[in-house]
Image: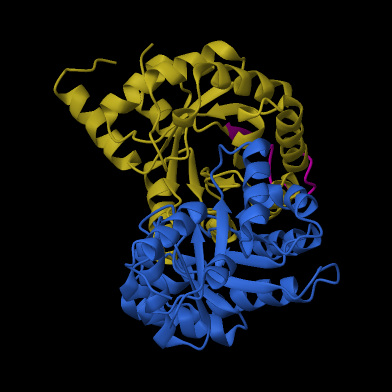
Chain colours: A yellow, B blue
Amino acid sequence: MRITEDYLKSIIDSTLLKPSAIPKDVELLCDEAVMIGFGAVCIRPDDVNYSSMLLHGTDVAVCTVVGFPWGIQKIKSKINEAYDAVCDGATEIDMVLNRAYLKSQDYSMLETEIKSVTNNAKNCVHAKDDVIVKVILETDKLTDDEIIEACKISEQAGADFVKTSTGAYGGATEHHVKLMKQSCNLEVKASGGIRDWDDAYKMIMAGATRLGTSGGANILKTYHNAIRLGSYVI
Amino acid sequence: MRITEDYLKSIIDSTLLKPSAIPKDVELLCDEAVMIGFGAVCIRPDDVNYSSMLLHGTDVAVCTVVGFPWGIQKIKSKINEAYDAVCDGATEIDMVLNRAYLKSQDYSMLETEIKSVTNNAKNCVHAKDDVIVKVILETDKLTDDEIIEACKISEQAGADFVKTSTGAYGGATEHHVKLMKQSCNLEVKASGGIRDWDDAYKMIMAGATRLGTSGGANILKTYHNAIRLGSYVI
């Protein structure tokens, strides 16, 4: 598989979720995403309205997070948060699953949670476009068996992607991406600690078809360096 | 000021917020709180209903968190989360402020946020009792000037307490508790890193009238040790 520049750009969710970011940071993120041509920005729920306005008429999708970063909210809160995000212009929802359900093997509740959020987001009458739902597992805090179970349940519940991490803890590993890819028929978003082309390449080779990163520009830069230096040939 | 055992117990919010905790952990927390006589348990939003049931008829208050731990949700989401928590039986709401508003000096939005959550929680017709609202600043991520501003705005907005930390980062410091106490006429809840009597004593001396901790039992044990050994005399 040869990774072209266009493909690489298209699978990057350029991410800014830290609580201290101010509106100017959001503007810079959106401007950069348009300039470079990233597939999406992934921003805080409270920034969705503003980012949607900034990105109106461009090809950059607006992605946001639900129950972020701990996933400890009630199902009802997550449903409302996702629905409101879609109303505000988001077309991609990265929800954090309730880890307590997974750890206590309450798989029925976990499926109910993911299904409820997914259905409400996808069926929002104000959606700008088809809504994509990704389920954040926080793989660093799970056993392999729990990861496999979470992937299967996410698929049953109608999600589109499983995503490795919030970035608040350890990030994506090749092992986890491969495991997730093997466990279900969903796409895999790798996130957390992906800072340059080497990291991105490993994740893509492991099976990731989306990368969540705050280092999108650097990934592109180091990709170009690799091609220039002949260490990567397309 | 002599700190009696009864007072010490009464100001402890025995806390369990980690995403991996299972229902059995919540049960143990509530049982212990009743047995020891803590003032409150502080549990995840998704556990409020169950904890309220477990603690029905006891003197232990149910506290939960809103926008936890990053505070990046829309105001609307925080209002709904707080309102639902009160409906579920919580009488204390620890809300994480939107740090972006503070960092960008959008004080009007910050006041609107805190006031909206506070008013909606306090005026919920399903409230079991008077509702107490605490505003979590995450002092470790703020300058002294930002802490002072956040305290003043919290007071103007009608909150009851300012609270140092989520516990996800650095915890409470004596400096921050004193600064918060001096900056407003609200009570101060110290939280994060309070594990024994020495920690608790320092926070109380600095001005804290509430302690958020997962080490409540150990604080009591080490308090008794200190009295037994004569290092603390009541």
The residue drawn where x is 46% and y is 52% is: B218
For residue A85, say whether it is visible. Answer: no
Q: Residue A20, relative to residue B23: is it above or below?
A: below
Residue at the extreme right: B125
Q: Residue B201, relative to residue B18: is it above or below?
A: below
In this image, A105 relative to A219: left or right?
Answer: right
The N terminus of chain B lies in quadrant? bottom left
Image coordinates for residue A139, horizontal then vertical, percent: 48, 28
Magenta span: A123-135
For residue A136, say whether it is visible. Answer: yes
Q: Residue B205, relative to residue A130: is it above or below?
A: below
The C terminus of chain B lies in quadrant? bottom left
In this image, A87 relative to A71: left or right?
Answer: right
The residue drawn where x is 57% and y is 80% is: B111
Which of the 4 image quadrants contains residue B109? Answer: bottom right
- Foreground pick, A73 / B188: B188
Image coordinates for residue B77, horizontal then vertical, percent: 67, 60
Which of the 4 image quadrants contains residue A152? Answer: top right
Image coordinates for residue B163, horizontal then vertical, percent: 49, 70
Number of numbered labels in the structure image? 0
Image coordinates for residue B229, horizontal then vertical, percent: 34, 61
- Foreground pick, A175 / B173: B173
The residue drawn where x is 48% and y is 23% is: A209
Q: Main secondary structure of the magenta part?
A: loop
In this image, A140 relative to A118: left or right?
Answer: left
Please tell me whether residue B71 belongs to the stretch shown in magenta: no
The residue drawn where x is 76% and y is 27% is: A108
